Image (spheres, rainbow, N blue to C red):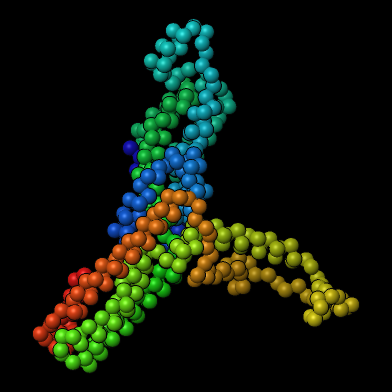
Amino acid sequence: MMMPRTHDQAERASPRRKRRRVVADDYLASLHPWAQRSNVRRMGGITLAEILSGQTCSPISLSDFELYLVYREVSIEQLQFIVWFNDYRKRRPPFSTRNGPRGLSLWCRTRSPVDSTFNDPELRKECMHVISTFLVPGSPKELLLEADQRETLIKGLETSCHPDLFLPVYKEVYFSLENNTLPRFLAYSLLNINLPKQVLWYITGILIFISYIALAALMIALIPPPRHNRAWRLVTVPLFHLGVTATYAAFQGFCSQVFARDAVQLHTWELRQVDEEAEAYVNLVRASLQDVPMGLLFNAADGKYSGAVKAISAVPRSKPGEQGSVALMRPLFGPERVVQDPHVLKAHRQIMDGLWCVGLVSDILLSYFRYLDIRRSGVCGFFFLISCKCTV
């Protein structure tokens, strides 16, 4: 049975991949296990077969899933093996029917992988390349399989290259990818903000709660005891509402402003790809300008030639990783892209509806406890109200 690759195993297998994963995690919004399970339930209708067949759109398309596996899960080899097997199974040679339908039906009943049509040298060469890439222990894209399963497959390839030889491995890899990796991808793809903005919403909620507590203390201390005067304490309800909704939105990794634009911030795996492409482009431009000895002076007013050509010494370029190399700063409020997948849009609407419900319930409960005829006054009454609020 195939064991799913953990982050620790992936890090020991490739130091370079470990560095990429740490960079991505530094910018990924934190998601509580309860919120993660809620997102998985909202996206429960999405299967791996739909993603592989191109039935999903951004931000849960096949290309997004590939980036997630490369920069987050460090398990792109599983998807590559599945794609190869599906392609290899479609390219199977036609079966010989020289013995008529009876001979063909006999082969279908036995389903023996030993067949002369699967001894083609090109197919054997391709299968040996797959073995060296995915099944040899210590290979860069090794699939974590049981030793006996690996030996059975290699031994079967000595006589045939039939696709059914790879079928047990394919089922194990497919099961692991669909039941272990795909739920995490769907849960994190449903986030429409990254860590900096999530922290911003948490801080905003805490500051609003502090303002609410201060205002509530003033209302309790300054408003006289008669019951009809206690209605003025309800002016603190809007502050409590804003604090609850801001904190709950941060807990869900969700921003109503981004939702109103039907957009999501670029996820960490997308940003990592953009970083690498930008760095490669800048390094290419720098390399092309290394041998340029002079520059042309322009008029700052109209941008035309000033008529003078002055030799300018070339500025030495620093290598990547040294001081002066490319450093990309990710903005707090972007970049964003439009959500195209209808399943994600529907799930975002469900989160927004839940946000309204949480705020409404908290307002009703707080209003009820704030208007109660509490027989104690001063600090004791204040802490009683706070304890009631905490139980909501």
Asked if residue 159 is positioned above or below residue 313 in the image, the reply reads: above
Q: Is residue 350 left or right of residue 232?
A: right
Residue at x 57% of width, y 69% of height: 327
Instruction: Specify the quadrant that holds the N terminus.
Output: top left
Asked if residue 157 is positioned above or below residue 301 in the image, the reply reads: above
Q: Nearer the viewer, residue 317 or 105?
A: 105
What x and y, as percent, mark residue 24? Answer: 46, 61
Q: Nearer the viewer, residue 36 or 46?
A: 46
Residue at x 29% of width, y 68% of height: 360
Pick out the residue farthest to the right: 307
Residue 216 falls in image quadrant: bottom left
What x and y, as percent, mark residue 211? Answer: 32, 83
Residue 192 falls in image quadrant: bottom left
Q: Is residue 245 left or right of residue 119?
A: left
Residue at x 51% of width, y 36% of height: 84
Asked if residue 384 is positioned above or below residue 339 in the image, the reply reads: below
Residue at x 11% of width, y 86% of height: 376
The total of numbered circles placed on residues is: 0
Pick out the residue farthest to the left: 375
Residue 105 falls in image quadrant: top left
Q: Is residue 97 left or right of residue 306?
A: left
Q: Is residue 379 left or right of residue 182?
A: left
What x and y, as percent, mark residue 74? Answer: 45, 51
Q: Nearer the viewer, residue 194 or 123?
A: 194
